Image (cartoon, rainbow, N blue to C red):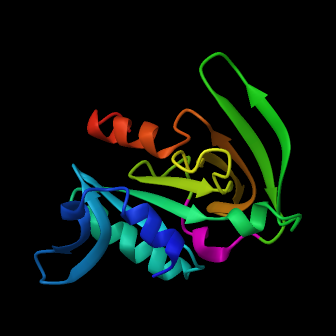
Amino acid sequence: MSDWHLDWQERLPIECREVYLKNSAGIAHRADAVLNKYVFEFQNSKMSPDEFYKRNSFYNDLGYKVIWIFNLIADYSHGSGNIDCYDEWSNENDNGGKFSWKYAWKTFSYYSPQRHKRIILFFQMHDGSDDEEDCYMERVIWARPGGSCSDFSRFFTSYLISNYQELMSWVSEQRL
């Protein structure tokens, strides 16, 4: 478990961390965290599309929505050029960004934020150096279609929930 992963887990109450869930067939998975009817998965490394799909299906079948937070800090920062913001847009209700991803992961080949309403995807693309408590992140609300799902070479984000405190507030109010 990376320091990044551990830092995210430690933000949640200890009784919510490393929760084993079992389905009616006796298959069990360990969720990084469970709060209310949300499973949190903190992903610091690449994963296969099959594993991403299997985890989502397992938790969704048990009645949970899955909130993913992916660490993309290295891809976005330090001049890597892997992820670039090509347009900041805003309106009175939300601010968001439009991004291009030079080497989009294949992790999301079964996933489309436009279609999969029980999966909520966040990318942490900032290291929180301005305010470590916030750990700024962006919620993916749209990704360019490629075939039946998305290829993530272009994606749009929402800043409506952009930090841990806002996420916990929304989860506790069951508004996501």
Task: Decide which of 48, 35 is in the foreground and name it.
Answer: 35
The answer to which quarter of the image holds residue 168 is top left
Question: Is residue 141 shown left or right of residue 152?
Answer: left
Task: Decide whether residue 109 is among the magenta residues.
Answer: yes
Which residues fall within the magenta stretch? Answer: 104-111
Query: Residue 60: percent from the left, percent from the top?
Result: 30, 61
Residue 172, position as x, y percentages in the image:
27, 38
131 in relation to 166, above or below: below
Q: Residue at x 34, y 68 (%)?
A: 57
What residue is rendered at 61% in x and 56% in y? 124
Residue at position x 56%, y 74% from top? 44
The residue located at (65%, 43%) in the rendering is 157
Q: Is residue 160 above or below residue 67?
A: above
Q: Nearer the viewer, residue 71 or 144?
A: 71
Image location (x, y in percent) of residue 70: 56, 64
Q: Pick the quarter of the image with the C terminus.
A: top left
Q: Is residue 168 visible?
A: yes
- Main SS, magenta region, reads loop
Find residue 171 and report its image quarter.
top left
- Please state, as top left, top right, bottom left or bottom right, where the N terminus lies in the image: bottom left
Q: Is residue 59 magenta?
A: no
61 sits left or right of 1 in the view: left
**Number of marks in picture:** 0
Asked if one can make out residue 43 in the rendered structure from this viewpoint, the answer is: no
